[in-house]
Image (cartoon, grey):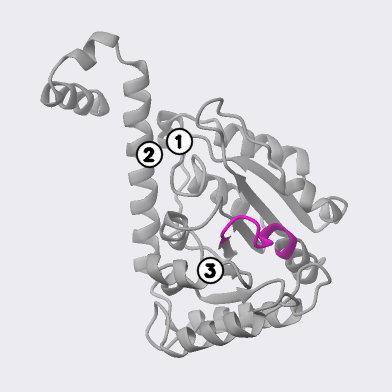
């Protein structure tokens, strides 16, 4: 693993403009690498769980990469990138690569150019790629199109189950994890999720697995890994590769269009916004074609 080359490539790709991304030959389609998406509300222990999971699944025959996305300040644009701190135990693991990324202008829980970033890691021959989102909500709909398996992490006593059901988030997940299961209320949320899973998931014939664990001491990490393998085996028989490729291409196209509009608005002369909305729209639409 050439860590320096990977780091330089990720930095260049993250900072690439829309035109630079379009000029590259990267096509974000289905590949042999397994993409795992980890999502959940802040504070539920996503990073700690990822650290345990990565250490458990990585070995000399299966190198694993982690893209951990941290929210950027809407005012300063800065980001703490604290996920790497919580995964410090993995830094010296020769089979794991970790990179924290700022969300920047992305508003969907991911970051700029995430399809191209994932493609770069696939080209670096990682067997598995873990993508951690900023938070919960809109992120699930974005990450759903970029990964093979979505893992939703919750904890007891936070009301996550009800809120996630209202937002339709649970329906997007392939695996439901109750972390911190040594806390009061773990039995209740586990039972609630079990009832939800029994009604079926986003794919006909697949019933989401519900896993209890405690990332702090590693309890249940074997069960989570087993659930992932079961989901992979099921998808190998049922996944629609053409549909997956179309969805990933659509997401990349839409995200590039949104960023291009932002670039043009930021670069526009102040007097442009003194025109009517229709005139502004025509100007921006014309600039996109140029």
Position of residue 260 relative to residue 159, above or below, is: above
**Relative image position of residue 290 (x, y in whole percent):** 25, 23
Q: Which residue is mark 3?
A: 159
What's the residue at 76%, 61% (across, down)? 51
Mark 1: secondary structure: helix
Task: Give the crowd class for mark 1: few <14, some 14-19, many >=20 residues within 10 Å.
Answer: some
Position of residue 227 relative to residue 214, above or below, is: below
In magenta segment, residue 198: no
Q: Is residue 106 left or right of residue 100?
A: left
Kindly report which numbered mark, 2 or 3, lies closer to the viewer in this rendering: 3
Labelled disc at residue 256: 2
Kindly indicate the quadrant of the structure image that contains residue 32.
Answer: bottom right
What's the residue at 42%, 33% (across, down)? 23
Mark 2 to mark 3: distance in Å? 35 Å
Position of residue 281 relative to residue 70, above or below, is: above
Q: Is residue 255 left or right of residue 236?
A: left
Mark 2: secondary structure: helix
Q: Are marks 1 and 2 in contact (CB under 8 Å)?
A: yes
**Relative image position of residue 133 (x, y in whole percent):** 56, 53
**Mark 3 vs 1, N-terminal side:** 1
Mark 1 to mark 2: distance in Å? 9 Å
What's the residue at 50%, 72% (across, down)? 161
In magenta segment, residue 48: yes
Kindly report which numbered mark, 1 or 2, lies closer to the viewer in this rendering: 2
Q: Is residue 94 left or right of residue 238?
A: right
Task: Give the crowd class for mark 3: few <14, some 14-19, many >=20 residues within 10 Å.
Answer: few
Kindly report which numbered mark, 3 or 1, lies closer to the viewer in this rendering: 3
**Mark 1 vs 2, N-terminal side:** 1
Magenta residues, start to end: 40-49
Q: Which residue is mark 1?
A: 21
């Amino acid at each position: 693993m050439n860590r320096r080359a990977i780091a330089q490539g990720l930095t260049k790709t993250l900072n690439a403009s829309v035109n630079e991304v379009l000029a590259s030959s990267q096509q974000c389609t289905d590949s042999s690498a397994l993409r795992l998406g980890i999502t959940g509300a802040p504070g539920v222990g996503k990073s700690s769980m990822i650290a345990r999971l990565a250490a458990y699944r990585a070995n000399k025959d299966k190198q694993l990469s982690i893209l951990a996305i941290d929210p950027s300040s809407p005012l300063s644009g800065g980001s703490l990138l604290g996920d790497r701190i919580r995964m410090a135990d993995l830094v010296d693991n020769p089979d794991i690569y970790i990179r924290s990324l700022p969300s920047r202008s992305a508003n969907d829980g991911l970051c700029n150019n995430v399809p191209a970033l994932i493609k770069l890691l696939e080209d670096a021959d990682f067997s598995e790629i873990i993508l951690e989102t900023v938070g919960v909500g809109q992120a699930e709909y974005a990450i759903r199109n970029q990964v093979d398996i979505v893992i939703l992490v919750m904890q007891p006593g936070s009301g996550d189950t009800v809120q996630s059901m209202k937002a339709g988030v649970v329906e997007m997940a392939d695996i439901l994890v109750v972390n911190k299961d040594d806390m009061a209320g773990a039995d209740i949320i586990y039972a609630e999720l079990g009832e939800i899973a029994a009604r079926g998931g986003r794919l006909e014939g697949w019933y989401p697995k519900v896993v209890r664990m405690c990332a702090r001491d590693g309890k249940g990490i074997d069960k989570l890994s087993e659930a992932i393998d079961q989901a992979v085996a099921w998808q190998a028989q049922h996944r629609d590769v053409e549909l997956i490729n179309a969805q990933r291409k659509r997401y990349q196209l839409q995200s590039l269009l949104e960023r291009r509009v932002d670039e043009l608005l930021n670069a526009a002369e102040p007097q442009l916004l003194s025109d009517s909305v229709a005139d502004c729209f025509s100007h921006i639409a014309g600039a996109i074609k140029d």
